[in-house]
Image (cartoon, grey):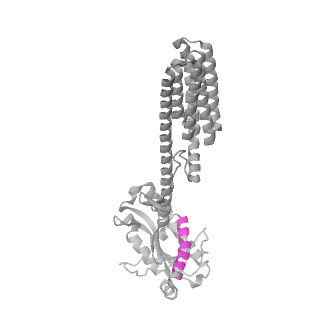
Amino acid sequence: MGLARLGGVSTPVGWDRRDRFTLRFVDSELERAYREADRAHGARRAQTASLLAAVVWVLVALVGPPALGIASGSTWLIAGVMTVFLVGCAGASRWATTQFRQGMIGLGQQVAAAIAVLVLTSVTDEFAAYAMAGMMLTAVFGFSVTRPPFVGAIGLGIFYCLSFLMVALTTGLGHELWLQLLVLGATVVSASVGSYLLERSQREVFARGRLVAALHARVDMLLRTYLSPDVAATLIEDPDRASLGGVEAEVTVLFADLGGYTAFAEKATPTEVVAMLNALFGVAVPIVLAEGGAVVQFMGDAMMAIFNAPTPQPDHALRAARSALTMQSAVADLPFAGERPRFRVGLNTGPAIVGNIGAAEIRNFLAIGDTTNLAARLQTYAREGSVVIGPTTYDRIREHAVVRSLGAPELKGKAQPVEVYELLGLHRTETVPPTTAPGTH
């Protein structure tokens, strides 16, 4: 199937093709969706048309006899029957749960109205003066308010003209017959064309709206695949947040990379390396996301996540700690875990500039600052399978954490030594069983 371009996106040619006469979509699924979407609007239109028409007939009963000097009995009888019928149709609109039922109610109203107009003008001897005007009003009202499908509108138009002609021939209308029939026919044709254009426009709007919704869903899915869900949701809800720059906020940064990755990659094929990375990240990423973290970057065998941005989290340090411990435990439980590299994880809490870093063409959502740099250094200091945290992180989770002091080693790029800790477990979480190693706090 060929492709057309819409808004820079390829779409199948003819995806919204319609029958030129009936206007129905050739694609049965698209036609079904259109009818389903129009169902609620159609029911309201049927109810509104019934009530408005009932009001018109009440006015005919009240105003007609004194204004035209005609007998009130027959007028009241015909108008009363129509009013009761139309109010009944308004109540039956709740039954109109399908387009077919809505069409039946609408067609029934218009046929009944046309017959009532012809009968009323005949019995009151006002056919020559008011029958054509009444039929024209009925046609215009039916096509504009009831809005039957175009095929139904054609049938109604033929019925209006034929019924008028049949009654006119019996009333001896004379030379005025063909002129009035011509005027009525022109009105019906114009109303039918209007009905056709209105339905065509409505179907075009529906099809385009459906396409836009599908494209939005596709873009949303891709955006949430390439960006952390919280970041994607923030950008979708507030596109202004995509501008370059950021704001200062306290965050907890998680860095994780695979110790032993280089040695593994030397012995494995590229396909095996990619499969290994996907398997480990496939375990780690959902754990981070479940704790509300935003995975903002993959760097070969490493990943970076931040907590407390873009969504505020008062317990962000604890969330990051749970993520790190659960990640290590889950990776250790994978089949053939001993043959694969394991994560080294560093956590650090502190102020950072959180926002979009890069160029106008391409940018990343990141946390920039010394907090992030220290988290990266802690990750390189950690052993495979361990989690190392900075002093601020430990201070935030002190009452929950089981740690082992690693002293104040000199870390690359840091002018002053920093007290660091190995995170062994968390009280009341049992993510990793508490350890009673020497030096445990």
* Residue at image point 41% right, 74% down: 374
Which one is in front, 262 or 5? Answer: 5
The extreme bottom residue here reads 267
* Residue at image point 54% right, 82% down: 272
In the figure, is residue 134 to the left or right of 374? Answer: right
Quick check: 125 above or below 90?
A: above
Is residue 176 in sight in this rendering?
yes
Quarter-wise, where is residue 325 in the image?
Answer: bottom right
Which one is in front, 239 or 168? Answer: 168
Quick check: 190 above or below 408?
A: above
Residue 299 percent across, percent down from the top left: 44, 75
Is residue 294 in sight in this rendering?
no
Residue 255 percent across, percent down from the top left: 46, 74
Residue 167 percent across, percent down from the top left: 59, 23
Image label count: 0
- Whether residue 25 appears in magenta in the rendering, the answer is no
The extreme left residue here reads 360
Residues in magenta, as a range: 272-291
The extreme front residue here reads 175
Which one is in front, 266 or 251? Answer: 266
Quarter-wise, where is residue 39 in the image?
Answer: top right
Residue 122 percent across, percent down from the top left: 59, 18
In the figure, is residue 119 to the left or right of 230? Answer: right
Q: Quadrant of the C terminus?
A: bottom right
Q: Main secondary structure of the magenta part?
A: helix
- Whether residue 275 appears in magenta in the rendering, the answer is yes
